[in-house]
Image (cartoon, helix red, strand yellow):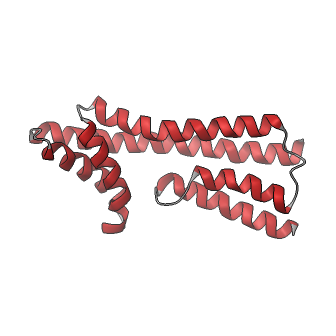
Amino acid sequence: MVVLGWVLVILLFVVGMIGAVYPVLPGVLAIYGAFFLYGWLVSFEPFGIWFWLIQSIIVLIIIVADYAVSALGVKKFGGSKASVIGSTIGLIIGPFVIPAFGLIIGPFLGAVIGELIIGTEWKKAFSAGIGSVLGFFSSLVVKIVLQLLMIILFFIWVFYH
């Protein structure tokens, strides 16, 4: 059962890190779920209140920051709520429509189309599209760093507590 637990935990960590880039996968929730899976299949003994408190705070920060950092990128470049919504839709649909480049082109086109629908001039809509891509990459960096921190803390708690 211990080997199965470790295999599934590592698999969820991989899914979580891929989910940081690919929004269709659960990302941070896969990593958080791996902690429970480890507890059920191996042991909850290494985890105390501080482990769960720290990990839960990181999860909340990631969820809030994911939206906020992306939206901030769009807003910083003059985008409106329409470009934030369009960018989010593009981020979800883009990888399916354009597999290789959809993660970049999807949010960009979504933000531009969102702005054009509400009557924004082309240059300002294009700028909002650039902001959506920069916001996506900024959000990606934040998610990757914080999710890696979650995984590192897990190993510290398991092997050193």
> Which quarter of the picture shows residue 10?
bottom right
Query: For the image shown, how many numbered marks are present on the structure?
Result: 0
Image quarter where the N terminus lies is bottom right
49, 133: nearer the viewer: 49
Residue in the image at 17% along x and 41% along y: 125
Give the percent coordinates (x, y) of residue 97: 30, 67
> Which quarter of the picture shows residue 16?
bottom right
Give the percent coordinates (x, y) of residue 63: 53, 41
Q: Note whether 23 is above or below 115 in the view shown.
A: below
96, 137: nearer the viewer: 96
139, 55: nearer the viewer: 55
Residue in the image at 58% along x and 55% along y: 17
Query: Can residue 104 be seen here?
Result: no
Tell me: 112 left or right of 120.
right
Image quarter where the C terminus lies is top right
Query: Can residue 71 be seen here?
Result: yes
Q: Note whether 10 is above or below 123 in the view shown.
A: below
Residue in the image at 80% along x and 70% along y: 4
Give the percent coordinates (x, y) of residue 100: 36, 65
Give the percent coordinates (x, y) of residue 19: 53, 56
Tell me: 131 left or right of 17.
left
Residue in the image at 67% along x and 64% along y: 11
